[in-house]
Amino acid sequence: MHVHAQQIPAEQIIATTDLSDYLNKETKENLGEDITEAKLAGYLREKFQQRYFYNYKNLSSKFEQYNSIYPEIESHHRQRAEDHLSKYEGPTHWKLPFNYLNGQPVDAYALRHLARQHKMLDIAFLYNYSNQDSQYLEYFTSQMNSLNNAFEAGNYETIENGNGVYEAFRSGYRVLNWLQIHNMFLGEEDYSDKDQLTTIATLLQHGQHLYENNQEFTPGNHQTRGMSALAMLSILFRDFEGTEEWYAHSMKLLQEHLSAEINADGFQSERTVHYHMSDIKNYFYVFQLARNSQIEVDSVWEEKLKSLFTTLAKIAYPDGTAPVFSDDTDAPWAEKNNIAGAMTLGYLLFDEPKFGFFATNKVEPDMFWYLSEEQLLHLDTIEKHVPEFGSLEFPATGYYIMRQGWNPEDMMMAISAGVDDEKPDHQHGDVLGVQAMANGRVLLPNYQVRYYLDDLELFKNSLVKNVALVDDELQGKDYRSNKGGSGFGKFATLPRPQTQVFKTQAELDLFIGTHDGFSKVGVDYSRKVIFVKNDFWIVIDAYSSEKPHDYKQIWQGHYTLENKKGLLRSTFEDGSGLDILQLKNIDGIESSGARGKQWSVVNKKAVQNHRFLTILHPFRVFDTRIDESADSPVIAGWDLNDPLWKIAGEDATAITKDTKGFFFSTEGITIDSKKLVFETPIDIYIEIKEGEFHLQSLEGNSINVQITKDSGLLKKLNIAPGENIVIN
């Protein structure tokens, strides 16, 4: 395989006096025989202004527009810039151990962020906020040169030790930031021709290093970030020999990532909103640059990129935010994700009104610089259509959405029932966990995390999820921090889920799933979730074992115990809230918490088999809560164990309303002169319509039923998992 892209070296930075030797034939012919540094720098400036996201000559007006749209952004940039300046000299170190300017040791996490150079971009902004104070420009060039010197001396962190400065993700991130800084400084007198050519030579070395060290597909967002940067370099500096190979190779690998890591259902394979939106940006940069240069990209790009935005719309809460899935890290401890910026970007790319529903009249501040003036003007006339998405599934990824509608107060639940086979590094211990929103509030939250916090393992595991547990077993096992010591860690073992039923209908949705997380202690486990549209959810956690165990449900939120029967309640400042009602006997409820979060643990102790039968009832106002003083409370108009419905079974429970009902652990039901008899206790939904019996199995396995009338057998039926049938 031909690895080197012609002569551009990966192991050294080309001297500015030699840079013209690496131009392609066509460019050399255009420039003529005597290519001075000044001539080459002028030529590359002209090409860069044509190819980059915006023309550097328009920086002044664009900068003014930026500060007008985002009036608080200056303080943000200043704070970040001053933080970086206070920690590192311009010519800094790139290999541990070394100290901050205050004498404290730099840790692995900080080194990785230094390598990304994202706060160097803030220093470039500070340069403009400080009347083009040249010290900030010089700080950039000196820090870049210090990396070049460290690289050529071999005095930098390598990929093998986990903190590689030139690892694909960090190198790619650095390229993205340095390209923007380069464009911001191009019109500045203090950014000399030699400075400009040194930056370009440095970027070319980065490109060749990315090219040589990423010859084969490696799953995950790290290589995606690196190949996005390589594709950008190949488009922007296509005057150099061999960059066409960079382009072909990076686009090939990126397309492999699109195919392998954007699941068939449209979700990014690492199963987090954070990395899903990060991938959107990785592909967007290349897509936008190619489109600006009239470079055609494969149609797969457009299809897959659009599917990423469609997925965000499908999982969104009714208020336009999204649930927290696994390693979402943008806002530690936040209980939802802000997707407005990403969806605004999707609207601009595809002019899709259902994306416009989530869009705002401005993009995220960092993306402002990557959009054309025409695109930004389009934000003044956003067309918004309410999405048509109802309850739906992501079968490849393992997310299931139960949705009432798109009004802000509508109910929605997300169920997590998947583990990525290739790279479950970012997966949390939330298999078969749920999150819910109603009345504009997140009722059953999950929490965003931050890698360097010392309780990351706690927040990645099951105690801070809405799941069911056994004894002291947590879902995530054998937690391992990464070898670089940055704080990130992952579980070596997670339960393997299996979805048995997901069925959505006008009046109810049904999910049934299992996982093997407790098999080593001899416990079989399954979870059912029934969404009674507009009213409540029913959650059934079922355990069976040959030996006694302690069984638990974990519910996130700040709750008080309202009665001895196990009614938990959480309320909000507007008087709305969530009631969690246990319909089977329990042995106690304990509360715990951390970082301002709280959770309640519902216990059933020392039994072989148990079923938690739990009502999750959101209420809008005080009068619609579950009456904590009632012996048999009415729940959103539904009755518990109404004697008009005759059910058989020692442990049978009925939740009924008018001519319909949910029946749990029932062995038989008598309706007028007809009787339904089941081989074993089962869960079933029945509705009587115009003299017909509409049945839906609420089981994950087939069930057998005999139908009799006046003691005579009418028929025998086998009902498949979740199947609906009608009996005349």
Image: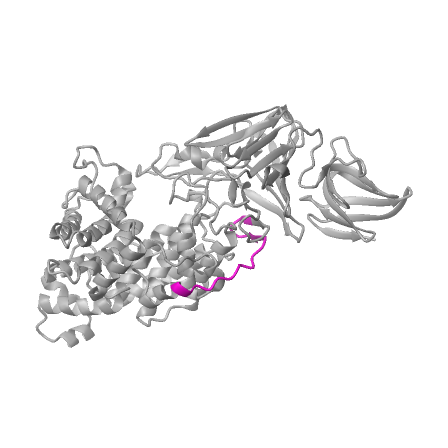
Magenta segment, principal secondary structure? loop
Residue 504 position (above or below residue 601): below
Q: Position of residue 45 (x, y in %)?
A: 18, 66
Q: Position of residue 118 (x, y in %)?
A: 26, 49
* Colouring scheme, one of rainbow, by chain, secondary structure, one colour: one colour
Q: Residue 393: within the magenta?
A: yes
Q: How many marks?
A: 0
Q: Residue 42: within the magenta?
A: no
Q: Residue at x 51, y 57 (%)?
A: 264
Report whether 275 appears left or right of 94: right
Q: Is residue 241 visible?
A: no
Q: Residue at x 16, y 63 (%)?
A: 187
Q: Position of residue 351 (x, y in %)?
A: 44, 66
What quarter of the picture does the N terminus occupy?
A: bottom left
Report whether 236 appears left or right of 302: left
Q: Is residue 193 visible?
A: yes
Q: Residue at x 38, y 43 (%)?
A: 331
Residue 345 position (above or below residue 661): below
Q: Position of residue 582 (x, y in %)?
A: 64, 32
Give whichever of 656, 587 is nearer the camera: 656
Write down the quadrant of residue 288 in the picture.
Answer: bottom left
Magenta range: 380-400
